[in-house]
Amino acid sequence: MTTQALVSEIKKKQSFLCIGLDVDLAKIPAHLLELDDPIFEFNKAIIDATHQLCVAYKPNIAFYEAYGLKGWKSLQKTIAYLNTKHPEIFTIADAKRGDIGNTSTMYAKAFFEDLAFDSVTVAPYMGKDSIEPFLEFKDKHTIMLALTSNRGAYDFQTLTTDDQPLYKTVLETSKGWKNSENLMYVVGATKATYFSDIRTLIPDSFLLVPGVGAQGGSLAEVCKYGMNSQIGLLVNSSRGIIYASNGLDFAAQAAQAAQVLQIEMAELMSKIL
């Protein structure tokens, strides 16, 4: 998917919502456990109920790998369903991969070619030769960790190196990599006050923003400091939407939770743009 296609979908739906499909069999409705593939059936119901309210879905790969081959097959079925039924929706493999040379190429092939995701998350710690293989794929996007929403982000990401925080060095350095126009970045919603500085470094890039909802991030603050003329944001919510209910009405309740965010997003878009 091209960036412009994503922007068009955001404007059409008046939404920049990304829904995280982080499926835990211990949390999904009990009646689904009787089905042959409860993970896929849960995802399918969530997608069917919410696809008009969001522009992206983000399965966290760990929640599928944890169930072995069955979990991987559920992931394959989920992305195939999205690509067939809703090809206009941006898909993110939240895998946080990153290794050198041919290894990164194989990771990229797995997510971009075999599974046909639009994007994948990566970790930048090993440098450009671990990221550039992902950037070679046409109309695919590599979403690099920049400033994350977890408490441990302060262990390294905000440390001062060369008179500036490490995350700024990461952002500046990445702009010089081959095909860097295919980069997006992860910036946590709990770090909203950092967005202004980040936008001075990458004013036009899309930011994937976790941390709204269960982690306490403010959507209004994120938009105030992080939105650009093309919106430039994909704000993710996982638990707050997909686990809004564990009853028979789980999909309808998920849609209701998603709609609350979509309505707020539409209002913020009208005020800020």
Image (tube, rainbow, N blue to C red):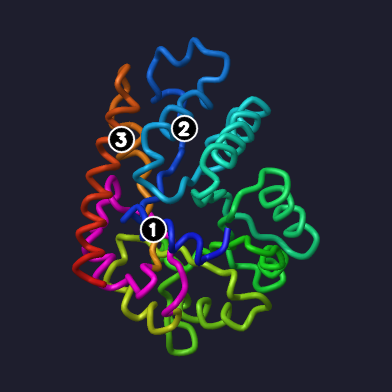
**In the image, which disc is placed on residue 23?**
2
Q: Name the residue under label 3.
A: 255
User: Residue 272 at x, y = what percent?
Assistant: 23, 71
Q: Name the residue under label 1.
A: 10
Q: Label 1 crowding class (10 Å Cα cut-off): few <14, some 14-19, many 20+?
A: many
Considering the numbered disc 1 on the image, is that residue within a helix, a strand or a loop?
helix
| Residue type indicated by callout 3 | Ala
Can residue 80 be seen by looking at this rendering?
yes
In this view, the mark in front (3 or 2): 3
Out of 152 and 90, give the one closest to the viewer.
90
- Quarter of the image with the C terminus is bottom left
Q: Judge whether 9 appears above or below 238 on screen.
A: below
Can residue 150 be seen by looking at this rendering?
no
Q: Label 2 crowding class (10 Å Cα cut-off): few <14, some 14-19, many 20+?
A: many
Q: Give the range drawn in magenta.
A: 203-231
User: Residue 24 at x, y = what percent?
Assistant: 46, 29
Instruction: Report, in whole angstroms, how far the alpha carbon at label 1 lies from the one at label 2.
Output: 25 Å
Give whichever of discs 1 and 2 has the lower sequence position.
1
